[in-house]
Amino acid sequence: MREYLLVMLVAAAVTFLASGLCRRIALRTGALAEVRDRDVHTVAMPYFGGVAMLLGVFSAIVLAWQLPFLGRLTLVQQDSRAVLIAAAVICAVGVLDDLYDLPAYTKFAGQILAAGIVVALGVRMFWIPIPGQLVSLDYGASVAITVFFIVLCSNAVNFVDGLDGLATGVVGIGALAFFAYSYVLTVDQDLTRATTSSLITVAIAGACLGFLPHNFFPARMFMGDSGAMLLGLLLATSTVSLTGQLDPSQLGDGQSGLVPLVLPLVLPLAILALPFLDLSMAFIRRTYAGRWWFLPDKQHLHHRLLERGHSQRRAVLLMYVWSALVSFGVSVLGLVRTDRQWQVVAVVLLIAVVLLLATLGRPIRGLRRTQRPPVH
C-alpha cells in the first residue's frame, strides 16, 4: 500500500507542476476553448491539461517499475508499458484536436489506433461473466470487445466535462473507488496485490488530484480532448488488464462468485454513470422534441443544476457526491458476499433519490452567485 500511495503522490505532484507549463504552451499555440452558446465559461480557456496528466501518469508508472514490490512482476511492467504507449497516442490525437478541431471520424480513427496498440501489445479482455457461467473469449471476440470497450470509455468522459473541475473530480473519485475495489479484492482472495489495474487507477487518481487545483472553479485551464480521451482509455485498460491478471476460478464459485467477476467490467461504467445518464436523457429529450440527438443544447444535468439556483461550485460538489455514491456503492456491493448486498443497493438508491429530489426537485432561491471569470 505504501508504494501505491507513493505512486499517487508522484502523479499528483508532476501533474500539478506540469500544468502551469502546459497552460503557457496552450496560450502561445492558440489551443483555446472558445466560448460557445452552450458553454458556461465566459472567456477563452487554454487546453492541454491532458498533456500534464499524461506526464504525471507516465512519471508515476515509470517510478513504480523501479520499486521493489510493484517492479518485481514482469506482467505488470509489460501491461503498463502497453497502456502508456496507447495513452501517448490517444493524448496526441487529443492535442491535435484541441489545436485544429479534427473531424469526428479522424478522432474516432485515432481512438481505434490507440485501442489496437493495447491489443497488439497483449492487453485484452480474456473472459466475460454472464449469468450462470464464465465465457472465455477467442482471439477475434477478445480483440473486438476490447477495442469497443476502450473506444466507448474514451468518448464517455467528454459528456461530463461541462463545468470547471467536474470531469476531473468525477473520474478521480471513480478511480479511487476502482483502486479500493481491486486492492481489497486481491487481499480478500489472497492474490498478488501488485496488479496493473491497481497501478493505473491509483495513478489516475493522483493525476486528477494534481490537476484539480488548476481546473476547479474558477478554472485556469481545461483538460481538453487530450485529457478526456486519456482518462477514458486509462479507465478502460485498467479493467481489461484485470481480466488477464486475475484467475476467475479464484474469485468464488457459483452465484456468490458472479458479482466480483462482473464488477471489474461494471465499475468503469459506474464511474461514468453521470455522463451515460446525461447522454440517455439528451437522446430522449431531443428525439421527443423532433430534433437530432447529437444537436447541442443547454439542458444537460449541470445546466439544470445551475438553473435551480446552484452556483458552479455547489453544482460540481453535488455531482461529486452522486459519483462517490455510485462508485463506492458498487465497489462495496462487489465485496459484500452475503444477502447484505441488496441492503447496500437499497441504501445507495435511497440516498441517491433523496439527493436528486433535494437538488433537482424545485428551484432553490438565493443561492445564485455571480460567476467571476478565471484569472489569467
Image (tube, rainbow, N blue to C red):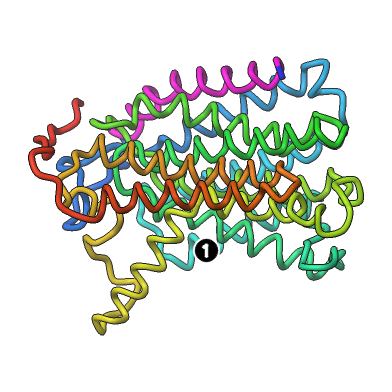
Q: Is residue 304 above or below residue 310?
A: below
Q: Is residue 228 left or right of residue 370?
A: right
Against 153, residue 59 (above or below) is: above
Quick check: is 203 in the magenta stretch? no
Residue at 63% over, 50% down: 236
Residue 11 lies within the magenta run: yes
Nearest to the observer: residue 256 or residue 39: 256
Q: Can residue 93 be seen? A: no
Occupied quadrant, residue 223: top left
Q: Residue at x 63, y 40 (%)?
A: 178
Task: Report whether 92 appears left or right of 126.
Answer: left
The segment highlighted magenta reads: 2-28
Image quadrant occupied by the N terminus: top right
Look at the picture and state if 151 lies above or below 193: below
**Residue 338, position in %: x, y?**
74, 47
Quarter where residue 125 is shown: bottom right
Mark 1 — residue?
Answer: 108
Q: Residue at x 63, y 53 (%)?
A: 342
Rendered position, 45 above or below 34: above
x and y percentages locating residue 288 in the rendered image: 29, 81
